[in-house]
Amino acid sequence: MKKKIKKNTNQENNFSKDSNTQIIRSLNKSKRRAIFTNATITISITLLIIPIFTIFTLIYYGYGFDESRGNEFLKVVESTISITEPNLIVDGDHINHDIDLFSMTGDFQLYKKVGLENKFVRTESYKLWFSQLDQPKKILGQNNYFIHPSQPLNIPNKDSVNQILQKLPEGTVSEMFISFDSLYHEKDIKNIFNDFDVELIWYAVSIEDHVGEYNQVIGYPAQTRNINSSFNEEKSNQEQLSNVLQFLSKHENWVEAITKNLNIKEVKEYIDHNGIQIYGATVTGPTKEFLNIGELKEIREYHLGDVELWNWK
């Protein structure tokens, strides 16, 4: 009789478990190695791509030197502020800018003149993504205190301003936004204020066809060799206005983004056809002097701006 041999099932089970465990460990090890390899490749590619993209961004905004896209962007913002913000001055020597991946940011320090001193107002930031200018939080031209001669005077402000002027002390200087009864040339405006102890700061130029549509003021600094680098050439600011409008017309998308709705090409065409006609001016000087100015027949309306302690001649 043959003797039956019994299989050791426990040994077979142990062998099977050990084999599965080794396979699982091997697979996990392979997974970890693959993850590590992929991570290493990803990091290496990233470290390689970032410098390439950085160099590309620097070339994108810096190529062309003075006429580079970055310089054009800074100049467009500066020039737009110059012609749309009465008595707001950009300090051209202190414009800060940063270039990040595919973007560029410009910070502009803004001042206004009240009396004889330039007073810091705020810093405004503007950002480009490639060539797309982000809509700024602060919209230019919101404080348009000028009234065009063609616009009705719904609520006269002159009398209430005079009451405030009478109550202000002698030892103060003020900023005033003055609207005229008609359209004048620059030399006429200078003659109107020739006998008064005040200083003309900024002229509002008529763009009559666009007053209702845009509610946007356009103008230029009254002072020659203005701190603003958009108007610091050796010629009259009136002449320089034409040059600034010509320059901005080449970047109408940026101008529209900054001002929200201004069609700079239409404005330029209107001024080229009709000439520079002034209907308002920002003026500064001793507060009490404006009580006398308010009696002039050419002064249709005015709005009081900032008031500071005496810093006059």
Image (cartoon, helix red, strand yellow):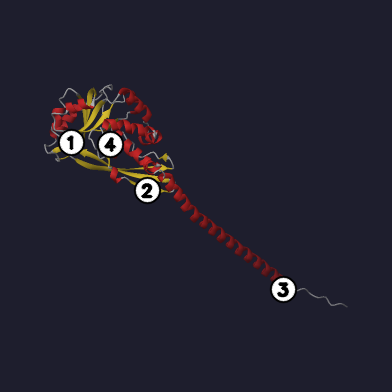
| Mark 1: few/some/many CA within 10 Å (<14, 14-19, 20+) | many
Residue at mark 1 to residue at mark 4: CA–CA distance: 24 Å
The local secondary structure at tag 3 comes to helix
Q: Position of residue 24 (x, y in %)?
A: 64, 64
Q: Extreme front residue here?
A: 234
Q: Position of residue 42 (x, y in %)?
A: 53, 56
> Is residue 93 in view from this perspective?
yes
Residue at mark 3 to residue at mark 4: CA–CA distance: 96 Å
Circle number at residue 98: 2
Q: Identify the residue under disc 3.
A: 11
In the image, what residue occupies the spot 38% across and 29% down?
265
Closer to the observer: label 3 or label 2? 2
Closer to the observer: label 3 or label 1? 1
Residue at mark 3 to residue at mark 2: CA–CA distance: 72 Å
Going from N to C along the chain, the mark reached first, 3 or 2, is: 3
Closer to the observer: label 2 or label 1? 2
**Which of 288/130 is in front?**
130
Going from N to C along the chain, the mark reached first, 3 or 1, is: 3
> What amino acid is labelled 3 in the image?
Gln
> What amino acid is labelled 4 in the image?
Phe
Q: Position of residue 10 (x, y in %)?
A: 71, 72
Circle number at residue 174: 1
Closer to the observer: label 1 or label 4? 4
In the image, what residue occupies the spot 58% across and 62% down?
33
Say left or right for 168 vs 259.
left
Going from N to C along the chain, the mark reached first, 2 or 1, is: 2
Q: Identify the residue under disc 4.
A: 231
